[in-house]
Image (cartoon, rainbow, N blue to C red):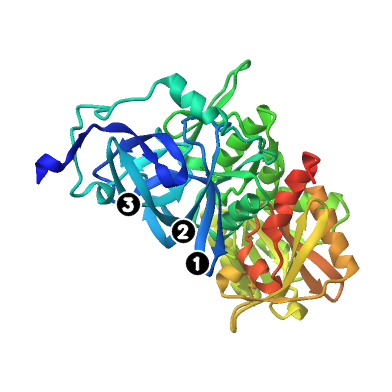
Amino acid sequence: MSQSKVIIGSEEWCSFPELQIPYIKARVDSGAKTSALHAVNITPFLRNNENWVQFEVNPLQNNTKITKRCEARLIDKRIVKSSSGFREQRYVIQTQLQLGEKTWTVEVTLTNRDSMGFRMLLGREAMMGRVIVDPEEKYQLGQASFDEIKNYYKSSEIVKNGLRIGVLASNPELYSNRRIMEAGELRGHEMHFLNIKECYMKLDATTPEIHYRGGRVLNDFDAIIPRIRPSITFYGCALTRQFEALKVFTLNSAASITQSRDKLFSLQLLLNHGVDIPTTGFANSPLDTDDLIKMVGGSPLIVKLLEGTQGKGVVLAETKKAAESVINAFKSLNANILVQEFIKEANGKDLRLFVVDGKVVAAMQREAAPGEFRANIHMGGTASVVKVTAAEKKIAIKAAKAMDLKVAGVDIIRSSKGPLLLEVNSSPGLEGIEGATHKDIAGEMIKAIEKNFKLK
């Protein structure tokens, strides 16, 4: 049986006849179960009531000008765990693989392999019963000359009208990040997910750089969409500043994200721009607790951790005694807190207005779960469509402008004094508001980038 098997090395040139890709270098990895092919702008479609997928392949590493447009029948969508431990949902196709003189049908997943050393990964499922791997050798089946490869692919250079856009975030499977990637690809852009923890930078006066896992230099992007979770604000903003130094357009700047994460500073900034907020107090010493409570109108009142997000670190103190206990407990932990008046008439409801490029593109009402006062979706709150007033839209737009955010989730509460601003979020989630309003907010974010480059 082994005599009929082909002996291959750890790296080989192979081809995909049905995809009209005659030359692509593969990393042979028997430790990987599934084979993977580099693909971008992946778009599923129907053909004769069958699921197909259209995609683009850059068959040569570090060359994005040479692009092959391919189509294949879609056979599956599968969760694949990468070597770095990240889970990603991928489209799976079935196509002919040629290694040397042997050709057979294999299953291949489609994924962006820009950060990897090879455009193709040959996994063990595709090799079983057909090849023997000699890890000490390379290119046992021969190599085409550089001129031969270049001449064939010369006619495959596609002039791209789209942009090269990176989503700088932590979790590729998060709904918001997936939607932004999909929206960009549907509008013809080359989208890349850039994991914040896998980026590192070179600070240099003449040649600043950002590198990605494996050593790839990320200096060729047109735009970056920062989606930085609070726990990694410092490093995420440092990377965003580095992209800005490279003259890459960032949908939200590092400065605007940094100041939005400082609740106290952001509230002071908003007040300076004439945006009304609930009466708020801040003190450094627990000795001033009594006056602090009186300052915001007494109990009940809200105590907020400055570092809290998604409703976490927010406590309702219903009595003066409870307020004193909560404030002193936080202070004993050296935690920075805000004390804020409780808007009882809101009945556990608030508004989330989504602002993109100076316009309110969607709005929803969030209602707290029974027995809960926080309306955050992450805390069990429910979302519904709501008609917002002109005054509420004006506050949201003014708040985003004050914070210098091109994309902002602005939270407003309706009070007897009129609409009051609660918070401005620089990386607002899309799942709740897109689900409630059925609006393509991710597409609006991509349009904001296109507007900067004067693309129609």
Q: Residue at x 67, y 27 (%)?
A: 245
Q: Secondary structure at mark 1?
A: strand
Mark number, residue 50: 1
Q: Amino acid at mark 3?
A: Thr
Q: Residue at x 70, y 39 (%)?
A: 161
Whole-percent x, y for residue 364 in the image: 73, 71
> Mark 3 vs mark 1: which is more N-terminal?
1
User: How far apart in space, not on screen, are marks 3 and 2 (Cα)?
Assistant: 13 Å
Q: Is residue 239 visible?
A: yes
Q: Is residue 295 above or below residue 116?
A: below
Q: Is residue 176 above or below residue 195?
A: below
Whole-percent x, y for residue 201 in the image: 53, 28
Q: Is residue 217 visible?
A: no
Q: Amino acid at mark 1?
A: Glu
99 sits to left or right of 400: left
* Nearer the observer, 351 or 188: 188
* Whether label 2 touches label 1, CB < 8 Å: yes
User: How far apart in space, not on screen, are marks 2 and 1 (Cα)?
Assistant: 8 Å
Q: Amino acid at mark 2?
A: Arg
Whole-percent x, y for residue 254 in the image: 67, 39
Identify the image quadrant of residue 454. Answer: top right
Q: Secondary structure at mark 3?
A: strand
Residue pointed to by mark 3: 105
* Nearer the observer, 12 or 167: 12
> Mark 2 vs mark 1: which is more N-terminal?
1
Identify the image quadrant of residue 118. Answer: top left
Mark number, residue 73: 2
